[in-house]
Image (tube, rainbow, N blue to C red):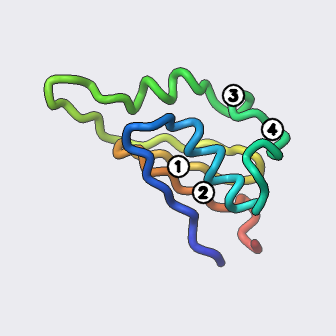
Amino acid sequence: MRQPTTTTDGAGNLCVAIVEAVADREVVPATDLTVPLHEAVDTEALERLFEPSGAGGHRRGHVSFEYAGYRVVVDSDRQVSVDPLDASN
């Protein structure tokens, strides 16, 4: 089984990082993905969930969801992991 693609996108757009990570796994440009990310997850809520909470506070945890045939996991450090849903890949 392949290892997940992992990318860290600390200050940038988290949703862009997710789409790019899935596109990398598919070996296609991000613009070639046929399923919009917002059909899999509330992208505004996802961005707000892991934005800095101010005054040195840091939220902990992770979110996982299915997108375009992959299990996407985003942790509180804005690290994105992408694994195929089909374990035989």
Badge 4 marks a residue whose secondary structure is loop
Tell me how far mark 3 sits from mark 2, CA to CA: 17 Å
Q: Tell me the kind of residue under disc 2.
A: Val
Label 3 sits on what residue type? His
Q: Mark 1 and 2 residues: CB-CB less than 8 Å, in contact?
A: yes
* Closer to us: 71 or 7: 7
Q: Most extreme residue toward the bottom, as rendered?
A: 1
- Residue lying at 71% horizontally and 69% vertically, measured from the top left: 87
3 left or right, relative to 89: left
Question: Gap between marks 1 and 4, in whole Å?
Answer: 17 Å
> Callout 2: 10 Å neighbours few (<14), some, many (20+)?
many
User: How many angstroms separate mark 3 from mark 1 (CA)?
Assistant: 15 Å
For disc 3, the marked residue is 38
Question: Do tag 1 and tag 4 residues touch (Cβ < 8 Å)?
Answer: no
Residue behind mark 4:
35
Which residue is disc 1 drawn over? 73
Separation (CA) of disc 2 from disc 4: 15 Å
Mark 3 or mark 2, earlier in chain:
3
**Mark 2 or mark 4, earlier in chain:** 4
> Which residue is label 2 attached to?
82
Identified by mark 4, the residue type is Val
Q: Is residue 10 left or right of residue 40?
A: left
